Image: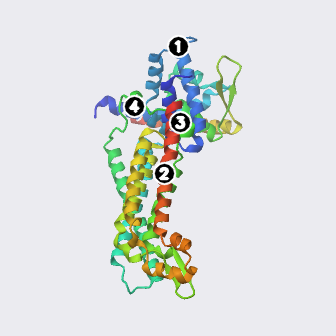
Amino acid sequence: MERADIVGGFVAELRRGTVILCVLASLGEPTYGYSLMETLGRTGIPVEANTLYPLLRRLEGQGLLASAWDTGGAKPRKYYSLTEFGREIREELKERWQSTVQNMNQILEVAL
Amino acid sequence: MNNELIRRYIYAVASCMPQKTQTEVERDLENMISELLEARCGGAEPAEGDVRAVLGQLGAPGELAVNYSGDESRAFIGGIYLMWFRKALKIVLPIAAAGVALASLASALLEGRATQEVAAFAAETAARCMFGAAEGAGWGFVWVTLIFRVLERKRVRLNGEDFLSKLPPVPDRRARMKPHEPIVQMLWCMLVAAIFLGFPQIISGYSEATGWLPALNVGYIRAHWYLMVLFAAFGLARELFRLVRRRYDLCVLLVSGAANVLGGIAASLLFGSGRIMNPAFIESLGPMFGGEAFVYQVFGHVNLWLLALVWFALLVDTGLAAYRALRRTREG
């Protein structure tokens, strides 16, 4: 296996683990799918449409997100927002993330 | 969004999903594709190239369906392989179970001892068929699991690059087939074969003088068991094709017509012969009905009535398949 493939695989694994927290953290206010994809892309976390939209649907199914159709514009749009339960989960994940980052930094400092 | 390619893509993804979520997923996909096209083209009408680019970016329908279902590749069989694994199981398990059950039935009939009591024979045959069906399904499951495990380990691609040119056409909603329909029909075919081969005495007549007498010649039916197995096999093949196709179209019509004609021929060879009637039953009709010629005509040819019923059922099935397929072709 090529070096680039190996690194690419690890990076994809890392991203896969963080994308849910990124989505929950980016949903401060009701947002539609493509807008969220652009926001994530601008902040250096590009997520493919074929990953993001199914993920939004799954999070909605788990009760973390709620959706509503906005039919006011030229085309109806589906807006997603965090539910109360989603906010609680986001806060918990955020704490876990910060603790993981701290631990990781310690490990990396010792190793390097 | 009236683009045919989009409609076919959405249908291809949704048809990989469980039926209860299909409508929601279809709506979700329409929304996603609409947003992606709008971002790509602004307010302008998307060209065919734009549609192809957006759908190409979303990937093969099977892979997108896996993302929607959330079946990540963590299990023994996961991801796109899990989706195809489930589809393969739906086809292989009924065939394996039906095949081994029919073979068990045929074997029981060939080995059946003349001295054995009917009830004991029936119970033994039913048990052999049930165990045979379970064994067939079990082996089918084991083999399909092993094959898909190997495919996943070897990372064999199950979707080609050019998936857009291979998208299935969207059938009219009324031409779509619910998966339980062919499965119920397959079970019905097996049940009919099992009853006729195992318990042909079910069609009997009663008189005080003779007691219960089977109308059909049990020995003749068991000696010609292969005709009933053929009749059931053509029915199973027809339903299996429908199960794979999942919609009524000209292909389903042609296969149904051919299977029904062949099944009808097998049934005619079995029921058409006068020897299938029990001579003792025919002789007993006089004492039963006091020599009424009309009654004799009706009950003396039970085999032909059964054959007429079979042909009627096959004609109705072919007619319904033709009606649904032709309506779809006209509207499509």
- Do the CB atoms of the residues marked 1 and 4 lie less than 8 Å apart? no
- Ranked by sequence position, the earlier of labels 4 and 2 is 4
- Report which residue position mark 2 lands on: B315
- Report which residue position mark 1 lands on: B41
Label placed on residue B166: 4
- What distance separates the C-alpha of mark 1 from that of mark 4? 25 Å
Label placed on residue B134: none
- Report which residue position mark 3 lands on: B327
Residue B287 in percent (x, y) is at 54, 84
Q: Residues within 10 Å of mark 3 (few under 14, many from 20)?
A: some
Question: For the residues carrying marks 1 and 4, which lies nearer the camera in this image?
Answer: 4
- What distance separates the C-alpha of mark 1 from that of mark 3? 37 Å
Q: Residues within 10 Å of mark 2 (few under 14, many from 20)?
A: some
Q: Considering the image in quadrants, where does the N terminus of chain B appear?
A: top right
Residue B96 seen in the current view: no
Mark 1 falls on what kind of element?
helix
Q: Residues within 10 Å of mark 1 (few under 14, many from 20)?
A: some
Three-letter amino acid code at disc 4? Answer: Lys
- What distance separates the C-alpha of mark 2 from that of mark 3? 18 Å
Residue B141 in percent (x, y) is at 40, 57
